[in-house]
Amino acid sequence: MKNYLILILVLTASVSVKAQQMEVAVTSGDFYEINIYRLNSKAQELCMDKFLKEAYIPALHRVGIKKVGVFKPIESDTVSGNIIILWIPFNSLEQFEELPRILQKDDKYLADGKDYIDAAYDNPPYTNIESTLLKAFSKMPQFEVPKLSSSPAERIYELRSYQSATEKLFHLKVEMFNEGGEVELFKKLDFNPLFFAEVISGSTMPNLMYMTTFSDMTSHDEHWNSFRNHPDWKTISALAKYKNTVSRAVIYLLHPTNYSDI
């Protein structure tokens, strides 16, 4: 009887630990993958559009990833070059890790994406891919679909990357967004943020990235003027501990493609 009670206690403790682990997995927030495809020709752009629209995004939908963002630089951007930016949300690292294996067993994906998947070495569909993995901020643990009424061709999606000189300064900048109130200010001023996240693996670290959205360029400019002049921002940015937390900012102004979910 004693051994039986001990066994029951061990099993109960085990179930409790597993439940806690599951709760952490569920509530710990989103992960995001951002891929920047660099292209050198119109043919590559057409190939990528076809693959993403007809094969890759439908395959992601089939595995439960319903909101995928695909973006290109606005017409006046003469710096970024010919690129396509792909944004994918994941509810766990396990989902991110399992995706390639699942796709390799998806016959429809393999057939629909054949031109891209089986591209020749001397005729690749892109020049290279810059891939970044991110973890959502605690103040915005899940992404939010922007509420915009303008046409996709008018909308401005602004992707920002803030690099820091050291890990300590990076953590202070993340704190500035979370506990410091920067995320709340973006929401208060209706920036329609898609996500805020820290980079956990990428080509430039330490850094964080976030995306805000606007109905058009006029709205973009008006929102940023309001932000810069808001008393809350002046208070936050004046704090000594947050000085010099950003060493380099990279900014992309983007339109969503006509097949983007976001």
Image (cartoon, rainbow, N blue to C red):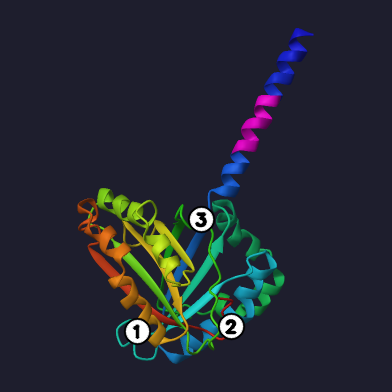
Q: In this view, does 221 lie above or below 186?
A: below
How many C-alpha atoms fall within 10 Å of the one at disc 3: few (<14), some, or many (≥20)?
A: some
How many C-alpha atoms fall within 10 Å of the one at disc 2: few (<14), some, or many (≥20)?
A: some
3 or 2: tag closer to the N-terminus: 3
Instruction: Report the quarter where the N terminus lies.
Output: top right
Main secondary structure along the magenta-highlighted residues: helix
Which quadrant would residue 164 be assigned to in this image? bottom left
Residue 118 visible in rendering:
no
- Choose mark 3 or mark 2, whichever is in front: 3
Mark 1 vs mark 2, CA separation in Å: 21 Å
3 or 1: tag closer to the N-terminus: 1
Label 1 sits on a secondary structure element that is loop
Q: Is residue 136 above or below residue 187?
A: above
Outermost residue toward the top? 2
Residue at 77% across, 14% down: 4
Instruction: Magenta stretch: give its range.
Output: 12-20
Q: Where does label 3 land, which residue?
A: 141
Give coordinates of residue 214: x percent, y percent: 45, 80
Label 2 sits on a secondary structure element that is loop
Label 3 sits on a secondary structure element that is loop
Q: Where does label 2 land, which residue?
A: 259
Q: Where does label 1 land, which residue?
A: 81
Residue at 51% across, 55% down: 141
Mark 3 vs mark 2, CA separation in Å: 26 Å
